[in-house]
Image (cartoon, rainbow, N blue to C red):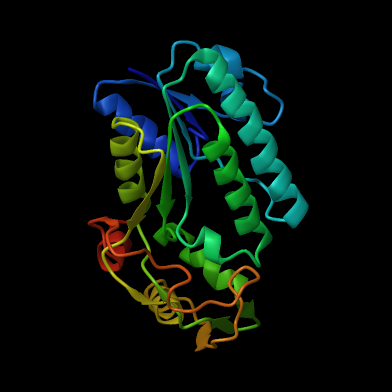
Amino acid sequence: MKIVVIGGTGLIGSKLVKQLIARGHEAVAASPNTGVNTLTGEGLADALQGAEVVVDVANSPSFEDKAVMDFFETSGRNLLAAEAAAGVRHHVALSVVGTERLQGSGYFRAKLAQEKLIQAARVPYTIVHATQFLEFLGGIAQSGTEGQTVRLSPALVQPIASDDVAAAMADVALGAPVNGTVEIAGPERVGLAALVARYLKATGDPRTVVADAKAPYFGVELDDRSLTPGDHPRLGTIGFDAWLAAR
């Protein structure tokens, strides 16, 4: 089966392409680096020719409110139109657990707009909501840094390793469309500030983490439900310690 992975040269996309090829499928890594641009439409029709499934794991290069909205709306419209023309039978998109609860953030407003485009299109779909990636802990720490202090919310998170994300995305891509959303998360639920403190200590970073319930997470305040999945998510197998040891 031919499966096109939009964003196929990035963190999740590159791992997903390898997984799909290992399972015996034709996986095409589609990105501006390979001549496929969802913003301009360049290369889309050729890349999607003969594809049964498209998996969109691309992310905006800018998180500025207008830029991120333009990215997800424009690329979403172009991609879904090209899929309909090519007869694609399953559109799979990677999104974020808590998207609908975090609409004070321009990034999450853009992700919700992307999801609404998918839901309104003619292509059968599955939206995968993932929790925060363990690989993003350094960036999360940086987002809350002032001098040598990292101020972060103590709210609960359930982070997932990118290898587990890629495995879940492969399973969804090879399954039937659910025309709805599935959630994936890591095996451990922990406070965000506490987790980042563990990460900094383990990596020899001298910064001090301060737990602050008012500290914003990319523009929004969190509570214990903001970034955690519902009752029956698919759980990854790689916890923080195993992930760190493998780095």
| Image quadrant containing the C terminus | bottom left
In the drawing, does residue 168 fall left or right of residue 93?
A: left
Q: How many marks?
A: 0
Residue 146, located in which quarter of the rendered image? bottom right
Q: Residue reaching furthest right?
A: 66
Q: Position of residue 2 (x, y in %)?
A: 38, 17
In the drawing, does residue 78 fall left or right of residue 87?
A: right
> What residue is drawn where x is 56% and y is 31%?
121
> What residue is drawn where x is 43% and y is 73%?
225
Q: Is residue 155 above or below residue 36?
A: below
Q: Is residue 230 above or below residue 145?
A: above
199, 192: nearer the viewer: 192
84, 236: nearer the viewer: 84
| Image quadrant containing the N terminus | top left
Q: Position of residue 194 (x, y in %)?
A: 40, 82
131, 9: nearer the viewer: 131
Q: Position of residue 220 (x, y in %)?
A: 62, 72
> What residue is drawn where x is 62% and y is 68%?
218
> What residue is drawn where x is 30% and y is 57%?
233
Q: Position of residue 207 (x, y in %)?
A: 53, 82
Q: Is residue 2 above or below residue 134?
A: above
